[in-house]
Image (tube, rainbow, N blue to C red):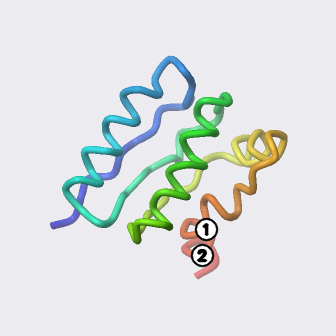
Amino acid sequence: MTQSPIRLASELTIRNIQQVHHDIAEQLTASDTLCIDASQLTRVDTSGAQLLYFLHHYCQTHHHAIEWTPPAEEVEHTLAELGLDATQIFALAQERIQE
């Protein structure tokens, strides 16, 4: 059964992080594949960046796949400013774009 993607709003910040975390945990309980549509995402704060980083790390270590619809380029710049590699976090999305 294909999961409906979790659609991120334009911002992933401390204000909405709890609901996003809940949605992610719920989908991971139901499936080994996490589907996230981040196409509307244009802004993350440090809480949002931390969630993205730890989500990537968790899925790698627990053998869960993530199917990304990538975010706006501004998000990659913000992550880079925080010392995070957006290319690594959104690796599957980058591979899908190049196909």
Q: Is residue 29 left or right of residue 71?
A: left
Image coordinates of residue 18 in percent, x first then y, are: 41, 26
Q: Which residue is mark 2?
A: 95
Circle 2 — which element? Answer: helix
Q: 10 Å neighbourhood of mark 2: few (<14), some, or many (≥20)?
A: few
Q: Which mark is residue 91?
A: 1
- The residue shown at (46%, 23%) is 16
In the structure shown, which secondary structural element does the residue marked by tag 1 occupy?
helix
Which residue lies most toward the bottom here? 99
- Name the amino acid, label 2: Glu
Question: Residue shown at 63%/69% (left/top)?
Answer: 94
Residue 82: % across, % down: 79, 40
Relative to 24, is 58 on the left or the right?
A: right
Q: Nearer the viewer, residue 82 or 74?
A: 82
Quick one: 34 or 38, which is closer to the camera?
34
Q: Nearer the viewer, residue 91 or 7?
A: 91
Residue at 47% in and 28% down: 17
Tell me which corner region of the image, top left, top right, bottom left or bottom right, holds residue 42.
Answer: top right
Q: Is residue 33 above or below residue 75?
A: below
Q: Quadrant of residue 85?
A: bottom right
**Whole-percent x and y of residue 4?**
26, 53
